Structure formats: structure tokens, C-alpha cells
Image: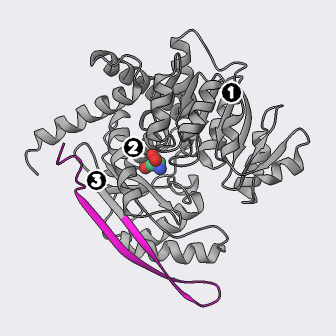
Amino acid sequence: MERFTEPERTVLFRVPWVDDKGNVRVNKGYRVQFNSAIGPYKGGLRFHPSVNLSVIKFLGLEQILKNSLTGLPIGGGKGGSDFDPKGKSDREIMAFCQSFMTELYRHIGADTDVPAGDIGVGAREIGYLFGQYKRLRNEHVGVLTGRGLSYGGSLIRKEATGYGLIYMVEEAMKQRGDSLKNKTVIVSGSGNVAIYTCEKAQEFGAKVVAMYDSNGYVYDPNGIQTDVIKQIKEVERARIKEYANRVESAQYFEGCKGIWSIPCDVALPCATQNEIDGESAALLVKNGVKYVGEGANMPSTLEAIEIFQKADGVVFLPAKAANAGGVATSALEMAQSSGRLYWSAEEVDAKLKTIMVNIYHNIDNAAKKYGFDGNYVMGANIAGFEKVAEAMMAHGIV
Ligand code: GLU
């Protein structure tokens, strides 16, 4: 455990770049290569002003266990910067990404460390990062995942975290003779994870009534129209407030916390860490929530998790299991890159579904085996840890 909690390597670096006014700007860059016992380091890059070493380390530790749960050969790592992509021009984003990669490239590699996106890092940023890596190394390899489809990306990677979350929630419901059909759902956030969670939940017949961004939330009793959210967030990069201007049945409320006061059957926090505190958890339970599935990384505080776990009949699916579909599909992207071929969307989606169903049963069985029936926090930690620990011991003291 002592070796497990100490990162194998931590890289901290300066990221200088020039903004559109000609000013020199400097940000902090991070890559924590946490554990490579079961495969190359794997985990996203986060660009957000809240990023610091502590945030990257908690994300990295989660990533080790999550990646192990996927059953695929990927170790754990995480990185990012305190750079704020909000309000930056395309050229500024490119300048930042190129500078970031000019240092990062010497530490990563397709068989060493394979970063991907996370908050603030999507297809555009991965494109600029990949371009600079390729230029510096003169190698076109699967060194990043979440790549565009024209240069090595995988179909369904973009949708994978959200779709995977819903596959797991549906499996947990199925085991209890229940399903998402006609359920009222709250999906917090409006980034990549939230959008495809909303899309898939609706495919399963649920009604998603609310979503938010960092300014406030929209409530639409008729069910959120995913295509309108996509247009606002993926195309226009605008605020979610816009949704209420375009959809008559919707209302916009300033501030985020109020979203958890809306009664729902299923709560799917898909924005960021600590977005559900004890007070919000208690309110959700009081209003009858039955399933909580974490799409974001650690969105529930410890106090909130305790409340969900103590509440009668509430199923709590922790992030490291519930949102593993993203990184699992990254591992599928790596496999396709190594094989120099592409799988169809149906093929990738079927593999993703199988992985999520397997993870659910693995954590359920581990919880049962160790005397914590229904406690998926325990189940996920134990099932994830076992494999990594076994590999670490096989490698000796390194
Ligand atoms: N950022 C995602 C996560 O938290 C995906 C990481 C990846 O695909 O490497 O798992």
C-alpha cells in the first residue's frame, strides 16, 4: 500500500506561450506517472484553473484502480495545467498546446504513457497536442487517445464515458428488476460526459429534466433536447443559459446547487469533483432518488457518499467503476492503433457494453465476497486493487 500510494514519477514543468496581444504568459504543467504495473501509464490531461498537484494526484490514483477495473492492460496516470481555455482564441489554444507538448513529449510514448482528454481538453486540443508530438518525434503513433477519426481516433470514443455510465446504471437496475424506462433523471454538467449520458439515458426511455454548466442550470420538464445542448456546447461553445432562450418549456436558474433540489429517480453527476455535498445528497435522498451513478471523477464528497450508502434502497455507483467506459474505449483505440486498423461503431459499442456489464458484476461480486454486499465503493476499490497489487508483487521491489 505504501508503494501503491507513491507515484512512480511526477513531472512538473513550465509552459510559456504568447497570447493574441503579444503578452508572454506562463502556466504550470503536470504529468503524474502513477503506476505502470499492468500497462503503460494512461489517463487524461485536464486544463482548468483549479488544477494543482493535489488534484492531479487524486485523479491519478483513481485512474490506477479505474483502469484496472476495465480488465485492459493500462496503468494509471494523469496530467494537465492550470491554463484556462475559456475565452481563448483558437490560435491561443494552439500556442498553449504546442508549448505544453514541447516539454511533455520527452516523457510520454505509445508504450510508455498515453494521455487523453479530460476537463478542458477535447478533440481540438488533442489535435494540436498530437500535431506537435508528431512534429517533434517524427512518429505517427497512438501516443494520445481521443484523436480525431481522420488520424487514428476510434469511433465511439467521444460518446464512451456517457454511454458506458448508462450501460452500467441499466445493468444495476436490471439486476433489481428495474430499468431506466420512464425514470426522471438529472445529469449535471454539459461537457462531453454529460451530453452523451443524456443522449443514451433518453435512448433507454428515461427523461432527463435538468443539466448545468458552471454558471447555472436549466430545467426542462419535457425532457432536455440533446441536439440543442450539443449545438450550444459543442458548436457554439456558449453558456447553457442559451437553452432556455431556444426551448420554450425550459427555465434557467442562476447557480448550480439548486439542481439537486429537483426530485428525480436517478442522479448522474457528470461535471467535476465535489459537486454533490452532504446537504445536496440528503435532499436527493429525501426526494426519493434510487440510483446515483458518477460520470465525473469523485463528484460526491465523502459526506455525500456516506448519506447515499446509509439510505435505504439507494444504489451508489462510484466514479472509478461507473465512468470507466471512457478510458476503456481509449484502450480500444490503442489496440486499433497497434493493429493499424479500425473497428466499426457497432463493434466498439458492443465491446464497451460488455466491459461495463463485466465491471458491474466484478464490483458486485467483490463487495459480496468481502462481506460488503451492495457497497460498490468497497467492491470497486478491492477489485481494482487486487490486480495491480498482484502485478506489483510479481515485479519485486521496484
Ligand atoms: N479523462 C478520462 C478519465 O478520467 C479518460 C482518460 C483516458 O481516456 O485516458 O478516465
Residue 57 screen position, x and y as percent: 35, 55
Mark positioned earlier in the residue sequence (3 or 2): 3
- Asked whether residue 211 is in view, the answer is yes
Q: Which residue is mark 3?
A: 34
Left or right of 118 on screen, residue 331: left
The three-letter amino acid code for the residue at tag 3 is: Phe
Query: Could you say whether the residue bearing mark 1 is in a helix, strand or loop?
Result: loop
- CB-based contact (under 8 Å), mark 3 and mark 2: no
Is residue 351 in view from this perspective? no
Q: Is residue 192 above or below residue 163?
A: below
Few, some or many C-alpha atoms within 10 Å of disc 2 (few <14, some 14-19, many ≥20)?
some
Amino acid type, mark 2? Ala
Residue furthest to the bottom = 22
Q: Which residue is mark 2?
A: 335
Residue 311 placement, left or right of 222? left
Residue 147 percent across, percent down from the top left: 52, 55
Query: In this view of the protein, which residue sits in the foreground, 118 or 288?
Result: 288
Q: Residue at x 59, y 83 (%)?
A: 19
